[in-house]
Image (spheres, rainbow, N blue to C red):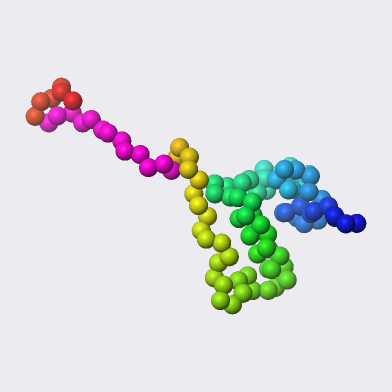
Amino acid sequence: MDHPTPLCLHCEAAPQATALRLCVGCAARRGVRNLYKPRAGSSPEWDAHLQKLVERAKKRLPLFPEGETAALPPRPRPVNERNVNRNVRVHLPCQSHPGEM
Ligand SMILES: [Zn+2]
C-alpha cells in the first residue's frame, strides 16, 4: 500500500472520515469535534508544525532540537472585525449645558 489511510487525529485507531480528520466515532462527539476545529490564526503551515511536534513526541525525541527554541514565529492574528483597532468617538452630555451634546 503506497498511501495508507491516515488515522484519526484524536484516537489514532480508525481511519479519518471527516474534514476535521477525525474518524466517525470521534466526529460524533461534540467535545472532540470542538477540540479539532480550526482556530483563529491556524494555517496549513502551523498544522504541519504541530504534526511534526506530535511525531517527535511519539518517538520520545526532544520537541525542539538543541539550539532551536521554536520552529515557527508566533502565529499571526487574522484580521477580522473583532481585533481591528478602531477609534470610537463618544459624545458625552455637556456638564455645563445639560441637554446639549
Ligand atoms: Zn477517532
* Quadrant (top left, top right, bottom left, bottom right) of the C terminus: top left
* Quadrant (top left, top right, bottom left, bottom right) of the N terminus: bottom right
**Secondary structure of the magenta portion, mostly?**
loop
Start-end of magenta stretch: 83-95
Report x, y in % for residue 97.
Answer: 10, 25
Residue drawn where x is 35% and y is 39% of the image: 86
Q: Is residue 50 above or below residue 21?
A: below
Q: Magenta includes 36?
A: no
Report x, y in % for residue 17.
Answer: 79, 44
Q: Magenta includes 91?
A: yes
Q: Is residue 70 above or below residue 16?
A: below
Residue extending farthest to the top is 99
Given residues 11 and 41, the one toward you in this image is: 41
Residue 55, visible in the rendered structure: yes
61 vs 101, left or right, is right
65 vs 83, left or right, is right
Residue drawn where x is 8% and y is 29% of the image: 96
Residue extending farthest to the left is 96
Given residues 34 and 67, the one toward you in this image is: 67
Which of the 4 image quadrants contains residue 63?
bottom right
Residue drawn where x is 23% and y is 30% of the image: 91
40 vs 25, left or right, is left
Report x, y in % for residue 45.
Answer: 62, 55
Residue extending farthest to the bottom is 66
Report x, y in % for residue 57.
Answer: 68, 68
Q: Is residue 51 above or below residue 18?
A: below
Residue 31, visible in the rendered structure: no
